[in-house]
């Protein structure tokens, strides 16, 4: 079992920066792909970024160049560094983990096995 707890969400002005953190505990060595997803109003859950155990990362097109995903060597902390935030980035952000390596479908929530409860990011214009 793997437990995930997100933190760092808050209200921020458009153009601002924010870093989300996810504390990963339990059987962390069993995880392969770790990722961040978000639920925005009136939109389906979407994958924002994912990172594999070898450090390979993937990003949603709309966040490329603005968001950076990182993990520590022990896979106990996952972070999402966000800059140049836009109102459309407003969402509940979830940390997720899979027991498999990241696949070409990493952005689908069905790829993940474990989920945190989320942290809210609000970007005001």
Image: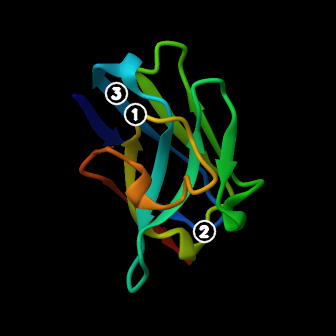
* Residue at the disc numbered 1: 99
Pick whichever, 108 or 115, lies toward us. Answer: 108
Q: Which mark is residue 24?
A: 3
Give the x, y percent position of residue 15. 66, 63
* Residue at the disc numbered 2: 14
Please name the residue shown 42% across and 77% down the image: 44
Outermost residue, top direction? Answer: 74
Left or right of residue 72: residue 22: left
Outermost residue, bottom direction? Answer: 42
Q: Name which of mark 2 and mark 1 comes first in the sequence.
A: 2
Dots 3, 1 in contact, CB < 8 A:
no
Discs 3/1, front = 1
Q: Name which of mark 2 and mark 3 comes first in the sequence.
A: 2
Please name the residue shown 56% across and 57% down the image: 48
- Helix, strand or loop at label 1? It is loop
In the picture, the quarter occupied by the C terminus is bottom right
Discs 2/3, front = 3
Query: Residue 44, can we see it?
Result: yes
- Helix, strand or loop at label 2? It is loop
């Amino acid at each position: 079992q793997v437990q995930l707890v997100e933190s760092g969400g808050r209200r921020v002005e458009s153009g601002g920066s924010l870093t989300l953190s996810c504390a990963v505990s339990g059987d962390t060595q069993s995880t392969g792909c770790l990722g961040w997803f978000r639920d925005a109003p009136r939109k389906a859950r979407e994958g924002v970024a994912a990172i594999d155990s070898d450090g390979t990362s993937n990003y949603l097109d709309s966040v490329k160049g603005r968001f950076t995903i990182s993990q520590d060597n022990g896979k106990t902390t996952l972070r999402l560094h966000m800059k140049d935030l836009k109102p459309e980035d407003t969402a509940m952000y979830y940390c997720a983990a899979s027991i498999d390596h990241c696949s070409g479908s990493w952005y689908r929530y069905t790829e993940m096995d474990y989920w945190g409860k989320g942290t809210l990011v609000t970007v005001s214009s």
